């Protein structure tokens, strides 16, 4: 009997990091999902991009589905119609897609409106730089803080902690604090745990789900498919 409690705790922790792929999404009339995918291997891409992720936001409404992201070579923020098939697609650029946070119903409607209202005001939208930033992950992290949507981006989402000078404030989850400079930084919170940031790389220990964060790697265990479900209530602010 004594061994069952540790086993149950271990099983619960493992289940907390179960995969969520887009095809498992239950699609309501209104839905917002933060997703990411590992960058593909391409001869024209720098070597370090093979260890990094690209994040974006998908928004579903009764009138259609939209993808909002920032890509290299795009003048400004990109808004794309993706349809229901694109919303639940498990693969992009030959790589598996992960869902990191989801909102539904009224919370998704409110959040979707906030995202659309501020996305095109991203201040660095004309100065893309793959490493250390600003890049697609910098944009999603900025969007999270601007809208209060609360998401823990994966540790190998290079650029998520980028700042041109000094940044002091809330983390992207809204449940922690960050202090970042262009070279060094740190964050601590109820979801992200404790992190150290150095020139775009992350190391630390996550709290929920429990994980180890190492440079160039997804979180261990679970990695890309260890999503935090996001706040159940309407987004703050």
Image: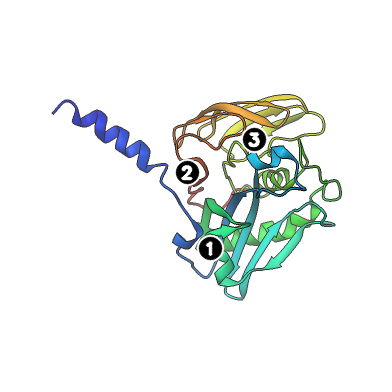
Q: Which residue is disc 2 drawn over? A: 226
User: Taking 153 as reference, is 194 above or below it?
Assistant: above
Determine the residue located farthest toward the left in the rendered image.
Answer: 1
Residue at figure coordinates x 66%, y 30% from the top left: 201
> On the rendered structure, is 119 left or right of 214?
right
Residue 96, horizontal then vertical, whole percent: 54, 53
Nearest to N terminus: mark 3 or mark 2: 3
Residue at figure coordinates x 76%, y 25% from the top left: 183
- Picture colour scheme: rainbow
C-alpha gap between disc 3 and disc 2:
22 Å
Query: Dividing the picture into quarters, in which one does residue 52 lie?
Result: top right
- Residue 170 numbered tag: 3
Nearest to N terminus: mark 3 or mark 1: 1
C-alpha gap between disc 2 and disc 1:
25 Å
Q: Is residue 1 visible?
A: yes
- Disc 2: CA contacts within 10 A as few (<14), some (14-19) or many (>=20): many
Q: Which residue is disc 1 drawn over? A: 106
Residue 18, horizontal then vertical, whole percent: 41, 46
> On the rendered structure, is 38 left or right of 130?
left
C-alpha gap between disc 3 and disc 1:
24 Å
User: Taking 135 as reference, is 63 above or below it?
Assistant: below
Q: Secondary structure at mark 1?
A: helix
Q: Secondary structure at mark 2?
A: loop
Q: Secondary structure at mark 3?
A: strand
Q: Are marks 3 and 1 in contact (CB under 8 Å)?
A: no
Residue 234, horizontal then vertical, whole percent: 54, 54
Query: Dividing the picture into quarters, in which one does residue 129 lie?
Result: top right
- Disc 3: CA contacts within 10 A as few (<14), some (14-19) or many (>=20): some
Q: Is residue 159 visible?
A: no
Residue at figure coordinates x 64%, y 69% from the top left: 82
Tag in front: 3 or 2: 2
Tag in front: 2 or 1: 2
């Amino acid at each position: 009997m004594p061994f069952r409690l540790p086993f149950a705790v271990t099983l619960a922790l493992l289940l907390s990091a179960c995969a969520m792929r887009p095809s498992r999404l239950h699609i309501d009339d209104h839905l917002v999902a933060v997703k990411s995918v590992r960058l593909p291997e391409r001869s024209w891409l720098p070597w370090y991009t093979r260890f990094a992720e690209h994040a974006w936001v998908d928004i579903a409404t009764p009138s259609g589905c939209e993808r909002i992201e920032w890509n290299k070579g795009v003048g400004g923020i990109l808004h794309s119609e993706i349809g229901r098939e694109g919303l639940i697609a498990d693969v992009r650029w030959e790589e598996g897609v992960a869902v990191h946070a989801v909102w539904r119903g009224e919370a998704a409607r409110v959040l979707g409106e906030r995202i659309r209202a501020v996305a095109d005001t991203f201040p660095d939208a004309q100065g893309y730089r793959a490493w250390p930033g600003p890049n697609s992950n910098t944009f999603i992290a900025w969007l999270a803080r601007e809208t209060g949507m609360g998401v823990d981006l994966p540790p190998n989402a290079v650029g998520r902690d980028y700042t041109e000078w000094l940044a002091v404030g809330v983390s992207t989850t809204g449940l922690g604090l960050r202090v970042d400079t262009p070279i060094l930084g740190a964050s601590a919170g109820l979801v992200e745990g404790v992190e150290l940031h150095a020139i775009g790389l992350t190391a630390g220990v996550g709290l929920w789900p429990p994980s180890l964060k190492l440079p160039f790697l997804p979180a261990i265990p679970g990695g890309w498919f260890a999503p935090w479900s996001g706040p159940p209530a309407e987004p703050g602010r």
